[in-house]
Amino acid sequence: MHKKVLAVWAIAAVGLAACSGTPAKRPATTEPGMAQCQRFYADPAIDPVRDKILVPIRIGQLQPVDMLTRRTHPTEQERSAIQALAKAFASCNARIAEKAGPPPMYRQTSNENIEQALAELQAGTTTYREFTKTLLYTGESDQIERERLASELEAQERHRLLRDHNGN
């Protein structure tokens, strides 16, 4: 029975991951702040959770099935590692904002959701599975908002071109 439940969760997790769309393109290390972000995430204090959380944390990143099935709460040592990971995530976002300017509002919301999920995991109020699900849902929501914004900007550009063409 237990294996059957795990199989159902695994299938659901794969489906959920697939629904989150195509994985986000990984930024090149030449993008603003990315080299510094790699240094933040290389902190050895994060090591105790590298097999439980995909590091670095990237919005829209697909999550392995085994991470979606891990129903355990972090240990004390892992809580310290999660705190270091949260610091690296926040530092990386701050560094990118410093180099490239503030992110769009939808991305700020996504970052806040992840910071909150990390805080809950670090406090031990959620499991690794719940954290991983939050990452998936946040990634999906972020992608939807990014597509909505792109569509809105495209519509504005079409409207501008029509207006310029008609002389209005």
Image (spheres, rainbow, N blue to C red):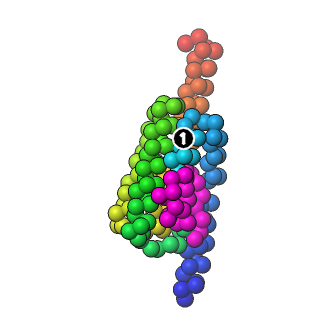
- Tag 1 residue: 36
Whole-percent x and y of residue 44? 51, 57
* Magenta stretch: helix, strand or loop mostly: loop
Residue at left offset 63%, top offset 52%:
23
Quadrant holding the N terminus: bottom right
Residue at left offset 57%, top offset 34%:
32
Whole-percent x and y of residue 76? 38, 68
Image quadrant in which you'd find residue 6: bottom right
Identify whether 111 is placed above or below 164: below
In this rendering, would 100 be left or right of 165? left
The span shown in magenta is: 42-66
Residue at left offset 59%, top offset 68%:
65
Query: Which secondary structure, mark 1?
Result: helix
Image quadrant in which you'd find residue 116: bottom left
Amino acid type of the residue that numbered disc 1 sits on in the rendered structure: Gln
Q: Nearer the viewer, residue 85 or 114?
A: 85
Residue at the far front: name it: 44
Residue 131, visible in the rendered structure: yes
Residue 103, visible in the rendered structure: no
Residue at left offset 63%, top offset 40%:
29
